[in-house]
Amino acid sequence: MNSSLYRQRAIQLREELSDDYFTLWIWDEALGAAGKPGQFYNVRALASLKNAQNSGKIPKLFKPISIFDNQGGRIGFMIKKVGEGTAALSKLRAGDMLELIGPNGNGFPIFRGKRILLVSGGIGYPPLWYLQKELINHNQIYWMHGGACQGDVFPSDEIWTEDGSIGRQGRVCSGMLENINKYDVDLIYSCGPLPMLASAAEISKSLNIEHYVSLESYMACGIGVCHGCAVPIGAKNDWEYLRVCKEGPVFNAEEVRWELM
């Protein structure tokens, strides 16, 4: 794991993706060299801190945001507006300032010569976008992505929506077994809502397929101090609580104690 760095950086570009999703781009060669697929940054809108101090309110906590893209220092954060922290980030435009701490956590293990299935749901898309760029030249990849509706999904090989507004109707894990057999999959990576990950892990375990998941968890500090993001990891009769922000967010799916989550 790389040591976390603190930076204040201006937003170079903002891209609108849908009503709820947007991407913020910054430039930092040092951070670009340090970041790996699956890692994240603790991000805060600098303006929100100043406004909070001026109004007498408690400053907002940093929000953990996965690395969406990293092009030699051009770093992108794909964000969904879901609460106060991301709402503050959604108000930023090019030239506004971000506070960043990272890269944090342990990323995905990288393999060669594998037949890989990527499975993502909703805002689980960004870390797999960065991951597939690292994998694509040395592996065979098929990517399934799902969401509630058309506004929740993004380019992939196969799209699922719960309302059927685009792609195949249903939940993304419904098509996993079909694609595992079709593409003779021997490695799975996934990121998304906890129920989706648990379903994907159950399928991979039943077929004895290696599988790595990127977990989401509420983080207060995001740097391993508070233990607020701890999850049960380990063998069935010999497990312990590990921190998503420090030992994770990527874990072997078979070692996650899904029944205790």
Image: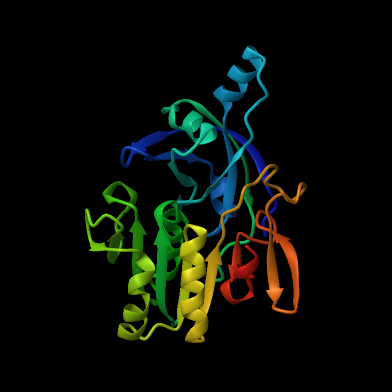
> Which residue is at a point 31% across and 54% down the rendered structure image?
154
From the viewer's side, name the closer residue of 72 and 82.
82
Residue furthest to the front in view is 259
Q: Position of residue 152 (x, y in %)?
A: 34, 50
Task: Report how many numbered discs are placed on residues in the image.
Answer: 0
Question: Does 169 appear above or below 81?
Answer: below
Image quarter of residue 38? bottom right
Quadrant in the picture for the N terminus: bottom right
> Which residue is at a point 37% across and 39% down the rendered structure image?
20
Q: Is residue 111 visible?
A: no
Q: Give the colour scheme of this rendering.
A: rainbow
Q: Position of residue 39 (x, y in %)?
A: 57, 55
Q: Where is residue 51 in the image (x, y as percent from the top left)?
A: 58, 17
Question: Does 69 appear above or below 212?
Answer: above
Residue 86 falls left or right of residue 147: right
Q: Where is residue 123 in the image (x, y as percent from the top left)?
A: 43, 51
Quadrant in the picture for the C terminus: bottom right
Image quarter of residue 108? bottom right
> Which residue is at a point 41% across and 58% down the rendered structure image?
121
From the viewer's side, name the closer residue of 38 and 194.
194
Q: Is residue 87 visible?
A: yes
Question: Does 190 appear above or below 44?
Answer: below
> Which residue is at a point 41% across and 69% down the rendered structure image?
118
